[in-house]
Amino acid sequence: MNLKDGNQSGEVARTLVEFLEVAITMVVFLKGFYPSAAFERRRYMNVVVQRARHPELRDYIHSATSGLLPFIEKGLVERVAVIFFSEDSVPVERFVFKLTINSSCAASVEEGQLEFALRSFLIKLSVSKSLVKPLPRNCRWEVTTYVRSLPEVGSSKEGEAWIPTDTKQWQKPPVITPVKSLNSEPLCLQLYLEHPSLSEPQP
């Protein structure tokens, strides 16, 4: 089925937002931040994935991703990261989804092709336990979005939803571990892990 003319880039953005919600849930599950009983197995894009059972956890991930839709459609979103922090609020690990949508090419994409490409990210995530490091005690996590430019705050309330991050930045370039990448039209997507360099100053 071809994505319908006149709304192709919107369909790609909606599919991407839905995928991000599932992928972020899988990241949190993969890290073992919560007991495995806090999740339930579901099928998405014909892949077995995890879904949060707790309504507050599920709603947080859903609102963090669904709120990105208008900004992804406008090409404002550059990266979406799941960041895990130590007790003193220093990042210890980042799962980064770097994305670009070429809206001029969206008309030619088949919905099935896009889902097939995104499915490979979910499969890769499900077998990536060896790539992640154990979390420190009393850690926390959040979803952070990095934008190419700040949304204009006009008559709409879109810009009011944005909260500037106070995430501490590493002083040294991070160690990057590629997980999966997709480089095609209309979507380019990279998933990689960032860890602090061994020479990073300790807090």
Image: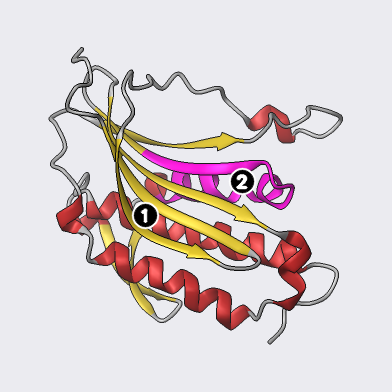
- Answer above or below: position of 46 versus 59: below
Identify the residue under disc 2. Answer: 68
Q: Please, which residue is most extreme toward the top here?
A: 203
Q: Which residue is located at x 23 percent, y 21 percent?
A: 200
**Residue 20: within the magenta?**
no
Real-space CA distance between mark 1 and mark 2, rounded to the nearest whole angstrom: 16 Å
Rendered location of residue 53, percent (x, y): 33, 57
The quarter in which the N terminus is drawn is bottom right
Question: SS at mark 2?
Answer: loop
**Element carrying mark 1:** helix
Type of amino acid under label 1: Thr
Residue 47, percent across and down? 36, 77
Question: Extreme bottom residue here?
Answer: 1
Above or below residue 152? Residue 133 is below
Residues at discs 1 and 2 in contact (Cβ within 8 Å)? no
Q: Is residue 58 above or below residue 44?
A: above
Q: Residue 128: which quarter of the image?
A: bottom left
Judging depth in this view, the residue of 86 and 185 nearest the camera is: 185
Q: Which residues are magenta?
A: 58-82
Q: Residue at x 78, y 27 (%)?
A: 153
Residue denoted by label 1: 25
- Which label number is shown at residue 39? none
Please name whichever residue, 172 or 40, is drawn nearer the observer in this view of the structure: 172
> From the viewer's perspective, is 80 left or right of 36?
right
Please report the residue visible at 83 percent of the width from the left and 75 percent of the height from the top. Answer: 5
- Crowding near the residue tagged with mark 2, few <14, some 14–19, many ≥20 C-alpha atoms within 10 Å: many
In magenta segment, residue 76: yes
- Picture coordinates of residue 122, whole percent (x, y): 37, 67
Q: Label 2 sits on what residue type?
A: Leu
In the picture, which quadrant includes the C terminus?
top left
